[in-house]
Image (spheres, rainbow, N blue to C red):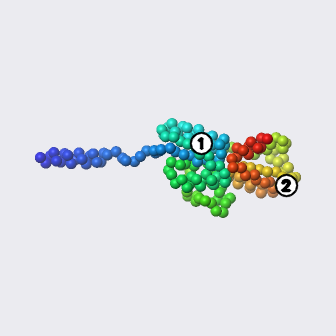
Amino acid sequence: MRRPTFAVAFLAVLVLVAKPSSAQTWPQRTVKFIVTLGPGSGVDIGTRLIADRLSRRWGQPVVVENRPGGDGLVAISAFVGANDDHVLLAAPSGSFTAHPFIYKNLPYKAADIVPIARISNTIVVMAVPTSLEVKSVAELVAMARAHPGTLNWAGTTGSNEFLFAAFLKNAGLSMSKVPYRNLVEAANDLAI
């Protein structure tokens, strides 16, 4: 009679050891991407394309929420404040890498954001309205020097803005920054 008791005890140990892990797969529910730029921006379009594919792959809804404004700080603060592993940030890396050089006080700590994937490349351009009749950077510099403080500029948040401000400083130019909540509006205004 000892043998059946041993066999039952051995089987019970095997069942306990072989019990499937209770770890859940991710995601278990809707995933949200918070985007630092507005609808129609390159980041928005790219994130929506990726969200559609991820939704099909994961079998869970993936939504995109645009939170433009405040040089990306609005979206980044919403992301950090969500404290939710199903909320992700979609932003140009310049949205947060340049912040420590631009602002004294940030509403988040650098350690609060961990980049996990690079999903696109950005091409940076400088453009002017055709009505300005400027055909090169040298001509733009000459015009800005001839008419200080009369030209305006707008740029994407973070590093691109930081780089353009450095360009202006190094060239000794005075242009006024026009802040846009959604940079797509700046491109539309430029085309007028």
Q: Which residue is disc 1 drawn over?
A: 47
- The one nearer the camera, 49 or 189, is 189
The structure residue drawn at horizontal position 19% and vertical position 45%, both measured from the top left corner, is: 7
| Above-or-below relation of 114 to 51 | below
Q: Position of residue 60 (x, y in %)?
A: 49, 40
Q: Dot 2, how many residues are within 10 Å of its Cα: few (below 14), some (14-19), or many (20+)? A: some
Q: Decide if residue 178 is on the left or right side of residue 139.
A: left
Say what secondary structure mark 1 lies in. Answer: helix
- The one nearer the camera, 29 or 120, is 29
Identify residue type, mark 2. Pro
Q: Is residue 110 visible?
A: yes
The structure residue drawn at horizontal position 75% and vertical position 52%, both measured from the top left corner, is: 178
**Which image quarter: residue 124?**
top right
Q: CA distance from mark 1 to mark 2?
A: 39 Å
Identify residue type, mark 1. Thr
| Above-or-below relation of 81 to 54 | below
Q: Position of residue 2 (x, y in %)?
A: 13, 48
The structure residue drawn at horizontal position 58% and vertical position 43%, both measured from the top left corner, is: 64
Q: Which residue is disc 2 drawn over?
A: 148
Q: Dot 1, how many residues are within 10 Å of its Cα: few (below 14), some (14-19), or many (20+)? A: many
- Circles 1 and 2, Cβ within 8 Å, touching? The answer is no
| Above-or-below relation of 103 to 88 | below
* Badge 1 or badge 2: first in the primary sequence: 1
